[in-house]
Amino acid sequence: MSQPTERNRLDGEASPYLRQHADNPVNWQPWGDEAFERAREHDVPVFVSIGYSSCHWCHVMAEESFEDESVAGVINDSFVPVKVDREERPDVDSTFMTVCQLVTGGGGWPLSAWCTPEGEPFYVGTYFPPEPRRNQPGFRGLCERIADSWSDPEQREEMKRRADQWTQSARDELESVPTPAEGDASPPGSDLLDTAAAAALRGYDEEYGGFGSGGAKFPMPGRIDLLMRAYAARGRDALLSAATGTLDGMADGGMYDQVGGGFHRYAVDRQWTVPHFEKMLYDNAELPMAYLDGYRLTGEPRYARVASESLAFLDRELRHDGGGFFSTLDARSPQPASRRDDSEPDEGEDGENVEGAFYVWTPEEVDAVLDEPAASLAKERYGIRPGGNFERGTTVPTVAASVEELAADRDLSRDEVRETLVEARTALFDARESRPRPARDEKVLASWNGRAISAFARAGDVLGEPYAEIAREALDFCRERLYDADADAGELARRWLDGDVRGPGYLDDYAFLARGALDTYAATGDPEPLGFALDLADALVAEFYDDDDGTIYFTRDLDGESAGTDDSGPLIARPQEFTDRSTPSGLGVAAETLALLDGFRTDGEFREIAERVVTTHGDRIRGSPLEHASLVRAADLVETGGIEVTVAADEVPREWRETLGERYLPGALVAPRPAGEDGLDEWLDRLGMAETPPIWADRDATDGEPTAYVCEGFTCSPPRTDLDAALGWLGDGE
């Protein structure tokens, strides 16, 4: 029997993840219509394997199975094998992940699915070992059994019936909106924030921080945000304690890179000690924003430091020279020379890749870098001891001893200890830089860049101007390389990679980048980012909003003219992204961003859409608010009107920016505008606005002095030339 596919075609792909598999003996095909046509021609199923470049278990399964000639022979003879980079095709990933979660109760990557030539899955799972293990089938044996079943007419019919059922279930889950018969839907209500925060509090781990008391710990910045917002509104100490306890737990643990800054993906243990070592752009965008808010709320300098160090990591290790941000650093890298067996040849950069090798330490490695007493202080501070807390006797640095404890043990002042630790950390960082580095996935994704842009812009508010300029440069990078202003609705592509652009963009690309552009305008007072945010919002509404269903879909209309591309493949559903996962819900961020941008339009359409969306999904949000943190924020904004601070000034005074950066004003929109009508007219002309939008209208500077107008809950203060007095109105409501 001839093989359905003659060769591995991933060598023509730009995606680093796909190129990682270009030398596999498996005849991988990229996702697209051609692969499924081959399956129809040869009457075989399609095996879909989904992952990403820094995924640890993706690497493991590749080494165990996809690099094995005998396994590859079974796959090539029996299936059309398709590799998918989930970061490039989140629509494909979302569809198959939904099926996996519905059928198995769990999910993750690598995601493995066998489907009909029409793209309907009939068997799903995640990682499969090469041989049966712990109630898991061995991968080769599983492939053989699936192929045999497909060859049996009766079993094939059963597989097709299963595929039909699973496909319908996926559509019901992903495309679900209330029917007209359920037309009594109402917005989630004013108590939603309290309900969500109470639920977060019930799941809080009081001993170690975070949520859940067993197994892995994932960063959940959306929950931290809900807790802080609810505390600010209600003043309940337990809410603040849960938020800060989680921030402290993550910052003290191994999930935070104690030497170089930035966060790893998640911790495998309750104590936050051992992480999965990949570093993702989105984690290092979302978490700094949580720490910045923690700093604003509590004044704790450490939170500002963690945010600053994490953003410094992004600037140093994930930033393109042109301003955009790359996607990931791999978890694995070759062992440094200090950990190689003397009997083994020097493997250099091409040695075996080991999980966490770049980040972990032994006591001997610290001693080789530092003299006493710095070496002892550093080892005790970071818990670096013989035997270690990780594999092969190594240690993931954590904060194992406080400055106060170290000072007391050694009869030193706290300042002496701090100074020594700063110098020691710098020396350890410099030494670590000589180690073989983890691989970097250099895709520039519009969505993830949008979150990074928001993080740097907000850091500009809190920490100063250099961060805002980095936000502006990243936004310009995305606008110049990923956005086509000449398209009918303004078209945004999904990714840029070394000049290669792949698209079209998805909802999260438009929503996250629009929010990043809005945050950049607020941080810089430059109207150009605002204009871009409005353009993206218009395109979002045109391409993703369905007025009949009252929702915003993750993809364009499958039947629309702009939906199809040559590699679109057979998508079985038009998904919506309801829940917050590793990134916020695109639906929630879109609704919130539209509500915020409504003040810059005179027709009220954006707010109407935001209100329609949260009303459509009101029951879903009320039923499980923790899983829908972004939608909770959007619903709260629609219900309360949020906080707006319009500043009329030719340039926002530095001390005003500092004041705004210090105040915790959750979800507040800062809207600079020129001081007088002449300047405002010039802005309106640049933005193509025929009328002055409500947020700027009748809000000139008073007597030429910078003037603040503060609004909360659809009620506004009188103009104030004293910003503190203007913000004081929020408390007095005069």
Image (cartoon, rainbow, N blue to C red):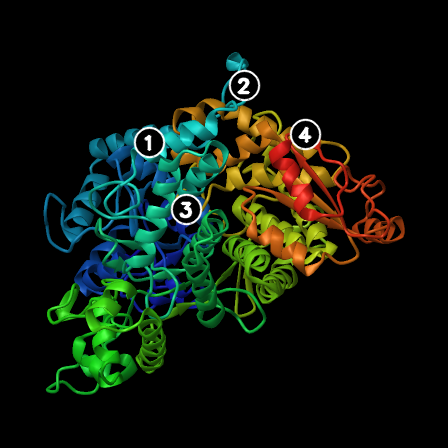
Q: Which residue is mark 4?
A: 714
Q: Which mark is residue 221?
A: 3
Label 1: element kind: helix
- The answer for how far apart the CA atoms under marks 1 and 4 are is 46 Å
Crowd around label 1: few <14 · some 14–19 · many ≥20 (10 Å): many
Q: Which residue is mark 2?
A: 186
Q: Which residue is mark 1?
A: 166
Q: Is 587 drawn above or below residue 263 in the view shown? A: above
Q: Nearer the viewer, mark 2 or mark 3?
A: 3
699 left or right, relative to 623: right
Q: Are marks 1 and 4 in contact (CB under 8 Å)?
A: no
- The answer for how far apart the CA atoms under marks 2 and 1 are is 31 Å
Q: Quadrant of residue 461?
A: bottom right
Q: Is 181 drawn above or below residue 362 in the view shown? A: above
Q: Are marks 3 and 4 in contact (CB under 8 Å)?
A: no
Q: Is 28 drawn above or below residue 191 in the view shown? A: below
Question: Which residue is painted at 78% across and 53% down in the image?
Answer: 649
Question: Which residue is painted at 44% across and 28% down in the image?
Answer: 194
503 left or right, relative to 682: left
Is residue 320 visible in this depiction of the protein?
Answer: yes
- The answer for how far apart the CA atoms under marks 3 and 4 are is 28 Å
- The answer for how far apart the CA atoms under marks 3 and 1 are is 32 Å
Q: Nearer the viewer, mark 3 or mark 1?
A: 3
Q: Is 221 drawn above or below residue 421 in the view shown? A: above
